[in-house]
Image (cartoon, rainbow, N blue to C red):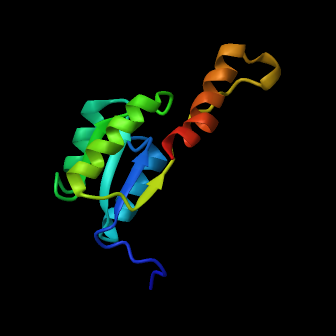
Amino acid sequence: MSKYKLKDKVVVITGSTGGLGLAIAQALQAKGAKLVLLDLDLNKVESQAKQLGGQSIAAGWVADVRSLESLEMAMANAAQHFGKIDVVIANAGIASTEALEHMAPETFERTIDINLTGVFRTF
């Protein structure tokens, strides 16, 4: 038995259309959570929200963790849609296959902006 009750808890997931984000969403949906899917691709977000149960169970919006304004708007939409937000999972992230010593400064900065600063913006 799960220690945490998730039925009807509203859970926001950034990076929700990728492998890990989608797996998290599916696991939470199976436990009865209501889902807010946030990602960069509106078509993917809407399609996955529909597959997870539609607007009463899962809703999605475009949000970019590099933009505080984007996140604030998405969180406001989520709170308005479901009436509350109980849990936020800052899942959005990227990875580079380049060794650090060969990585372009722009790639490093983008990685930090999404993987580190994006987490702070999400909360």
x, y percentage for residue 38? 36, 41
Task: Report if residue 51 is visible in the image.
Answer: no
The residue located at (25%, 32%) in the rendering is 43
Going by the image, does 51 lie left or right of 5?
A: left
Residue 95: percent from the left, percent from the top?
62, 32
Residue at 44%, 48% (x, y): give it.
Answer: 21
Along the horizontal axis of the image, is 115 left or right of 89? right
> Can you say whether 103 is above or below 20 in the image?
above
Q: Quadrant of residue 47?
A: top left
Left or right: residue 66 compared with residue 46: right
Q: Residue at x 66, y 22 (%)?
A: 109
Q: Residue at x 37, y 64 (%)?
A: 28
Residue 82 in sight from this viewpoint: yes
Screen quadrant of the N terminus = bottom left
How far across and how far down the image is residue 103, in percent?
74, 18
Q: Nearer the viewer, residue 61 or 97?
A: 61
Most distant residue in the right direction: 101
